[in-house]
Image: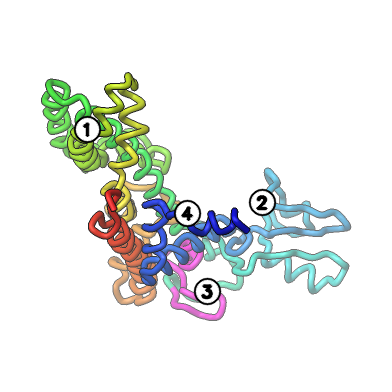
Amino acid sequence: MAATQETQDKPLSVFQRRWRKFKTIKRGWYSFQMLIGLYLLSFCAPFLVSDEAVAVSYQGELRVPMFSNHIEARDLGQRKIGSPNYRALKEQYAAADAGDWVLMPLYPYGPIENLLSDPSFEGRPPTGPDGSHWLGTDDRGRDVLARLVYGFRISITFALGMVLISYAIGMTIGAIFGFFGGRVDIFGQRLVEIWAALPFLYTVIIISSIVQPTVGLLIPLLAIFSWVGISFYMRGEFLREKAKDYVAAAIAIGEPNRRIMFKHILPNALTPIISFAPFAIVGGISALVSLDFLGFGLPAPTPSWGELVGQGLAHIKDWHLVVFPMGALFATLLMVVFIGEAIREAFDPKVFSRLR
C-alpha cells in the first residue's frame, strides 16, 4: 500500500506533463491516432486492396500467391498465358463447383493493374465511380482507390525517412557549431550558406535524367537539401544551453565533449525540433507530390498522389480525378498540421518549464 501511494505521489516528468497536455488537445490527439492507425493499416494493404489472391486452393493444393515467386495461369486451370486473373479465376472455380476456391482481398483491384484487358471492364478510361470501382479509374484504366491507398503509404514513408535523415544531419552539424563556436562556427556557417545556395530543383532534374529515381534515392537526395534549417535551430539551442550552469558543472568534473553534447545539452534542446517535425513531414509529402506532378519523381507505374493530381489537371472535366486525390492530400496534410499545432502548444516552454 505504501509503495502504491509513493508511486501515485511521484511527480511527473516534464515530458509526461507535456504528453498529458498533448492528449487534451482533441484535434491533435485524434488526428495523431487516426494518422498512425491509417499508416499501420496501409502495411496490410496486400490483404485488403490488391489484385493478387490471398490464397488459392486448386486440386487440393493450397497456394499463397503473395509469397510465391511466380504462378502461371495454366498451373491453376486457367486458359491463358502468363499471370492468372484471380477475379476471373474465382468465378471460374465457383461455376465449376469442384471444391476449388480463391480467397480475394476485400477490394480486389491492384494499384498498377491495367483494367483495359479485363473482360468485365466497360467504358473508356477514365471512368467515374461505380459499384466495382468505388473512386473510378484513371486515364490508363487503373483503379483510383487502390492507387490512393498505396500512394498514402509511399508518401508517409518518404516524408518520415526524409525527416529522420535531415534531422540527423542538421542536429549533428548544428550541435557541433553551437557547442564549439569560434572558428568552427564561423567557417562552418559559411559552408552551410554556400550549400543552401545550391539550386535544389535543378539538381533533382539533372540526377533524374541520369538515373531512374526511386524512393531509396529521393529520400537521401531531398534530405541533404532539407537539413539546413534544422541546423540553425539546433545551433541556437546549443549556444543558449552551453552558457548554463549544468554545462559548466559537467565540464568541471571532466565529462567528455561528446557526452556533454548528446547526454546533457541535447535533451534540453529538443523542444523546437520536436515542434517543427510535423511541419517538416508536411513539407516532405508536398515535395514528393510536387516532384511527381512535374515528372521528376517516382517512375511509372508507381502509385503516386502527384501523378493523380496531374491527371486531374489534364482531365479537369472528370471530377473524380480532381476531388479524390486532392481530398486525400488535403485530409492528410490537415491531420499532420493539427498534430503539429498540438505538439507546439503542448511543448510551449511558458506552460511547462523545468524551473517550476
Residue type at tag 4: Lys
Instruction: Please state which of the two labelled residues, at mark 3 or mark 2, is closer to the viewer.
Output: 2
Q: CA distance from mark 2 to mark 4?
A: 51 Å
Labels 2 and 1 touching (C-beta < 8 A): no
Instruction: Please state which of the two labelled residues, at mark 2 or mark 4, is closer to the viewer.
Output: 4
Q: CA distance from mark 2 to mark 1?
A: 54 Å
Q: Is residue 287 visible?
A: no
Q: In the image, is residue 133 part of the stretch drawn in magenta?
A: yes
Per the rendering, the mark at residue 133 is 3
User: Which residues are the magenta region?
Assistant: 127-149
Could you tell me which residue is drawn at 40 percent across and 51 percent down?
13
The residue tagged 2 is 66
Disc 1 secondary structure class: loop
Residue type at tag 2: Met
The residue tagged 4 is 10
Instruction: Please state which of the two labelled residues, at mark 3 or mark 1, is closer to the viewer.
Output: 1
